Each structure stands twice: as structure tokens, then as C-alpha cells.
């Protein structure tokens, strides 16, 4: 009768079931390991918030210039590579002028109290003069003195209505033997909540424009800031000349 086959078929079925269970648990173990690895990677990525602590040098070609910058000083991930680019955006901590690191994490995440990150942009120059050189022919015609003098000897000038510079002021300081120091800043109302409401640009390298934005609190130290930022970028710069 049919019962004679039962002792043989039952062990075969049991063996298949055991292997199925084994494979299922193995798959779950592999999936669990993958999730753990991915979780650690994703957790680090989230914690880094777009920053990197990699100090490897990336050589970025802009026009006839090569900028050799550490990757932890390059703002955007896509730009952290060797190659040709129309523009390079950097950021650095003041006064150390270093890039992102675990020790500087709070500063770069803007959780360290007073803002102290300087944002630098490099691109081929579009104007024949830097901001200081544009004061006499352009800015002096578009602004008028307010009589306010800020720490560091900076004279505040307001833009006239037809200038097109809304909610901005110009700060100017005379410099012996060279064009005046000039920077544009958002006025106090517009600057509220802004991390870097002041901006200045200078010309460096081979037809290269260096523009940097910085916290208003650093205006009083404008001499040291300007010299240090320009010097730092020049130290990373190689030109065709």
C-alpha cells in the first residue's frame, strides 16, 4: 500500500526543509552584515554633512593657473578631484586658515559660537580691476559717506538709491602707497542670520579673481584677514608664468 514509501520520503522532505532553513538564515546573516556596513558608512556620511577630513591635495586647473588645495578645504564634493574647472570654491577657518577636521567640526557646522569661516571663490577674472581698484572710478560715484567709522578705521559709505546695491554698505580704509581697502557688506538688518555678509575681491595669479566672503565680526581685523587669505591662496597657486 502507499504507506510503504513513507519511511523513505519523510527523511528526504526533512532534509530539504533543513537546507531551506539554513539558506534562509544565511541570507539573513549576509543581509544583516550588509546593513551594518551600510549603516556605518551612511552614519559617517551624515555626520560629515558634506565635509571631508581628507587632506589629500587636488590640483585644479583654472585658465593658466593650477590650484593645489587640500580636499578638506574644497567646499563641494564634486570639485574634490584633479582636473580643469571654471571655478573653485574653498572654505577655511579663521584665524587658523585650515580646512575641515574633527577638531574643527563645530566651527564648520556653525555651532562654535561666533562665526569664523571664510568662503573663498577662484575664477578667471571678468573685470580689469579688483574691488580696491574699482573704488575711485565706480564705487566713489555710487556711494556717499555716512560719517560712521568702524573699528579698524573703516569708513562706512552708503549706496545711493540708483546704484542697484540694495541693503548694502561699502567699507573703505586708506592704505599708504596703494589703492584703499574696500569691501561690500550687507547692512545690519539684512545681515541678520548671515554667516558671511561681507565680501571682497582681489586679482591674483594669471588673470585670476579671488573673491572671499567673511563674517562681519572680522571687519575690525581687516588688515590681517586680507593679507592672510591672499597669502594662503597664493601659497596654493602655480601659474603658467
Image (cartoon, rainbow, N blue to C red):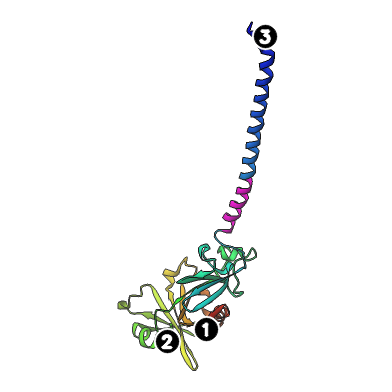
Image quadrant where one finds the N terminus = top right
Q: Nearer the viewer, residue 64 or 97?
A: 64
Tell me the mark number nearer the camera, choosing from 2 and 1: 2
Q: Is residue 180 above or below residue 158?
A: below
Task: Please rate how many residues cluster around mark 3, counting C-alpha atoms within 10 Å: few if below 14, some from 14 to 19, many from 20.
Answer: few
In three-dimensional space, the C-alpha distance between marks 1 and 3, rounded to whole angstroms, equals: 104 Å
**In the displayed structure, does residue 22 sit left or right of residue 116?**
right
Tell me the mark number nearer the camera, choosing from 2 and 3: 3
Q: Which numbered disc, 2 or 3, marks the residue that appears first in the sequence?
A: 3
* Region rendered in magenta: 35-48
Q: Secondary structure at mark 3?
A: helix
In three-dimensional space, the C-alpha distance between marks 2 and 3, rounded to whole angstroms, equals: 105 Å
Q: Which mark is residue 133?
A: 2
Q: For the stretch drawn in magenta, what is the main secondary structure?
A: helix
Q: Are marks 2 and 1 in contact (CB under 8 Å)?
A: no
Q: Is residue 89 above or below residue 220?
A: above
**In the displayed structure, does residue 132 sit left or right of residue 118?**
left
Q: Which mark is residue 152?
A: 1
Q: Nearer the viewer, residue 111 or 200?
A: 200
Q: Specify whether residue 83 is in view.
A: yes
Q: Secondary structure at mark 1?
A: loop
**Residue 102 part of the magenta segment:** no
The location of residue 175, given as percent across then percent down, is: 49, 90
**In the displayed structure, does residue 7 sit left or right of residue 111?**
right
Q: Which numbered disc, 1 or 3, marks the residue that appears first in the sequence?
A: 3
Q: Which mark is residue 3?
A: none
Q: Which residue is mark 3?
A: 4
Tell me the mark number nearer the camera, choosing from 1 and 3: 3
Q: Residue at x 34, y 85 (%)?
A: 141
Q: Residue at x 43, y 79 (%)?
A: 125
Q: Which numbered disc, 2 or 1, marks the residue that appears first in the sequence?
A: 2
Amino acid at each position: 500500500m502507499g504507506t510503504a514509501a513513507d519511511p523513505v520520503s519523510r527523511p528526504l522532505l526533512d532534509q530539504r526543509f533543513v537546507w531551506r532553513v539554513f539558506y534562509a538564515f544565511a541570507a539573513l546573516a549576509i543581509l544583516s552584515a550588509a546593513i551594518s556596513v551600510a549603516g556605518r558608512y551612511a552614519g559617517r556620511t551624515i555626520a560629515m554633512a558634506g565635509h571631508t577630513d581628507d587632506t589629500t591635495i587636488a590640483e585644479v586647473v583654472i585658465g593658466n593657473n593650477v590650484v593645489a588645495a587640500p580636499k578638506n578645504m574644497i567646499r563641494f564634493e564634486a570639485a574634490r578631484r584633479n582636473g580643469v574647472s571654471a571655478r573653485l570654491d574653498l572654505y577655511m577657518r579663521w584665524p587658523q586658515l585650515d580646512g575641515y577636521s574633527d577638531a574643527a567640526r563645530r566651527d564648520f557646522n556653525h555651532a562654535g559660537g561666533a562665526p569664523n569661516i571664510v568662503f573663498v571663490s577662484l575664477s578667471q577674472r571678468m573685470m580689469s580691476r579688483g574691488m580696491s581698484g574699482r573704488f575711485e572710478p565706480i564705487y566713489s560715484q555710487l556711494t556717499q559717506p555716512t560719517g560712521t567709522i568702524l573699528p579698524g578705521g573703516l569708513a562706512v559709505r552708503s549706496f545711493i538709491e540708483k546704484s542697484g546695491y540694495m541693503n548694502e554698505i561699502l567699507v573703505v580704509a586708506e592704505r599708504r602707497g596703494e589703492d584703499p581697502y574696500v569691501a561690500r557688506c550687507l547692512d545690519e538688518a539684512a545681515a541678520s542670520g548671515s554667516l558671511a555678509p561681507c565680501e571682497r575681491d582681489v586679482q591674483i595669479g594669471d588673470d585670476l579673481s579671488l573673491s572671499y566672503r567673511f563674517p562681519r565680526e572680522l571687519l575690525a581685523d581687516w588688515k590681517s584677514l586680507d593679507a592672510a587669505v591672499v597669502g594662503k591662496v597664493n601659497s596654493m597657486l602655480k601659474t603658467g608664468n
